[in-house]
């Protein structure tokens, strides 16, 4: 999905590697939900949609049709911010 790829790349701009570490998440959707929640990006502006600012939580909901809070939380996850990524 193009939107998923964009979201993964956008999170990299904040220094988060979505694919780093071990995970027990069954899907990329669940892993993205965890990364957004655990790094406190829920209300951070991710970009613009139809000329209006859009948060990571809003992008997630638009892509998957489900609110971020409705995705079950995973267990035994070790996804961390990259130390070499950009922090913009």
Image (cartoon, grey):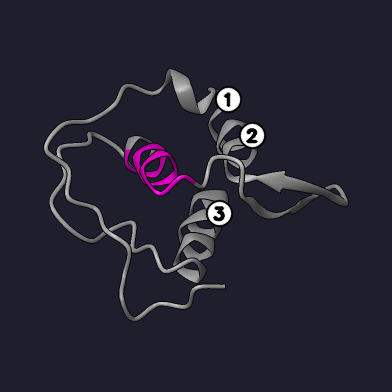
Q: Is residue 5 above or below residue 23?
A: below
Q: Which residue appears farthest toward the top when viewing the image?
A: 70
Q: Determine which residue is flagged by label 3.
A: 2
Foreground tag (2 vs 3): 2
Position of the C terminus by quadrant: bottom right
Q: Which residues are magenta?
A: 31-40
Judged left or right of residue 82, residue 51 is right
Q: Earlier in the sequence, mark 3 or mark 1?
A: 3
On the image, the x and y values in percent for residue 26 come to 23, 34
Q: Main secondary structure of the magenta part?
A: helix
Disc 3/disc 1 C-alpha distance (Å)? 15 Å
The residue under the point 33% across, 63% down is 17
Q: Earlier in the sequence, mark 2 or mark 3?
A: 3
Q: Is residue 70 above or below residue 84?
A: above
Q: Determine which residue is flagged by label 2.
A: 62
Q: Determine which residue is flagged by label 1.
A: 65
Pick the residue in front: 32 or 81: 81
Q: Secondary structure at mark 2?
A: helix
The residue under the point 31% across, 70% down is 82
Disc 2/disc 3 C-alpha distance (Å)? 13 Å
Q: Quadrant of residue 54?
A: top right
């Amino acid at each position: 999905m193009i939107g998923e790829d964009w979201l993964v790349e956008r999170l990299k701009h904040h220094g988060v590697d979505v694919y780093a570490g071990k995970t027990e998440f069954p899907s990329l959707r669940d892993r993205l939900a965890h990364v957004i929640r655990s790094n406190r990006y829920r209300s951070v502006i991710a970009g613009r949609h139809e000329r209006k600012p859009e948060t990571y939580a809003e992008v997630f909901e638009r892509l998957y049709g489900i609110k971020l809070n409705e995705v079950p939380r995973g267990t035994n996850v070790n996804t961390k911010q990259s130390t070499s990524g950009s922090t913009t």
